[in-house]
């Protein structure tokens, strides 16, 4: 299913990892049992209040950023109880079991304290599209350095979960833009920009990554409204999330990504994936 594939891709690509326990504490078998417990918990959680958010193709989503502490604690204990059951079923008792459970609690608390995962409305599988008439023309010139980049990829590439090397939308030069049509009106809250790292780039060069960019809400009657200006750090994580700097005064179905420059490539700029987060 598209939603399940989206959850798997986000979990693998973004590096927002489900908490895992140190291998020094667990045997290989116990480690696999823990992962099985997490899968069970995700099934339980997805059947609860966050079912609609999970259907947007993302991994685990805490229902609301301002959710009551008691609700968060209940979800934490649900996960710990599931891990406890798996350990019990497989004969892990005593000090080792308590140590594993304690580490599990600590890792969950780190995730809860630092971040939550948000729904992505800019997914082709959900019905999002790119307005080709109001988007910079794709580039596929002679400057490509690898067979991976031998032909121009369409702007809709931004809306796909694939972020393997070469699977990007490129435009000529360092300035360009794309207008994304969302499946429905949302109140935008954040945007996530993706690019490959130097480690997986065929040339070892990521100078084509966007640097300064802006996000604008587009209204057919009111025109464009700036929601935020950001900088993608080429030395940071491959997926970087930025919260809107301006609180939107209305909901939008069209979002404009405006790239103002890149990290030094004079010939073209590549964008691998863009996620638009928000509330309907």
Image (cartoon, rainbow, N blue to C red):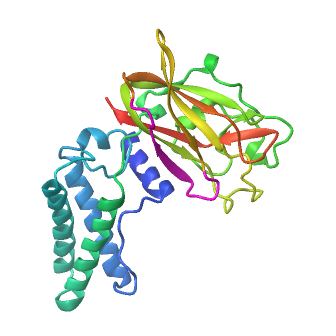
Image coords of residue 232 (percent x, y): 60, 47
In the image, taking residue 23 as reference, residue 103 lies left or right, namely: left
Residue at 32 percent of width and 40 percent of height: 55
Q: Does the magenta run of residues contain 16?
A: no
Quadrant housing residue 39:
bottom left
Q: Is residue 1 visible?
A: no
Quadrant housing residue 149:
top right
Residue at 81 percent of width and 43 percent of height: 144
Image coords of residue 256 (percent x, y): 54, 27
Relative height, residue 151 to residue 82 (above, below)? above
In the image, taking residue 55 as reference, residue 178 lies left or right, namely: right
Image coords of residue 254 (percent x, y): 47, 22
Secondary structure mostly seen in magenta is: loop
The magenta span reads 233-247
Residue at 65 percent of width and 44 percent of height: 211
Q: For the view shown, which residue lies furthest in the top direction?
A: 221
């Amino acid at each position: 299913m598209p939603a399940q594939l989206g959850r798997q891709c986000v979990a693998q690509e973004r590096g927002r990892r489900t908490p895992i326990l140190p291998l020094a504490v667990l045997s290989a078998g116990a480690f696999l049992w823990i992962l099985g417990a997490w899968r069970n918990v995700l099934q339980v959680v997805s059947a609860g209040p966050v079912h609609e958010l999970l259907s947007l193709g993302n991994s685990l989503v805490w229902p609301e950023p301002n959710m009551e502490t008691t609700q968060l604690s209940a979800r934490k204990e649900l996960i710990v109880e599931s891990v406890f059951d798996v350990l019990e079923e497989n004969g892990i008792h005593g000090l080792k079991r308590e140590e594993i459970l304690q580490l599990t609690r600590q890792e969950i608390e780190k995730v809860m304290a630092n971040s939550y995962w948000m729904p992505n409305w800019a997914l082709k599988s959900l019905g999002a599209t790119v307005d080709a008439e109001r988007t910079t023309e794709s580039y596929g010139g002679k400057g490509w350095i690898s067979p991976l980049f031998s032909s121009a990829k369409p702007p809709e590439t931004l809306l796909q979960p694939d972020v393997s090397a070469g699977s990007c939308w490129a435009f000529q030069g360092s300035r360009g833009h794309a207008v994304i049509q969302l499946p429905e009106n949302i109140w935008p809250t954040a945007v996530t920009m993706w690019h490959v790292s130097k480690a997986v780039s065929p040339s070892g060069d990521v100078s084509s990554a966007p640097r300064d960019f802006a996000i604008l809400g587009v209204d057919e009657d009111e025109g464009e409204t700036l929601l935020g200006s950001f900088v993608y750090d080429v030395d940071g994580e491959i997926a970087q999330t930025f919260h809107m700097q301006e609180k939107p005064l209305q909901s939008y179905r069209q979002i404009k990504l405006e790239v103002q420059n890149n990290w030094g490539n004079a010939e073209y700029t590549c964008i691998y994936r863009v996620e638009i987060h928000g509330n309907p």
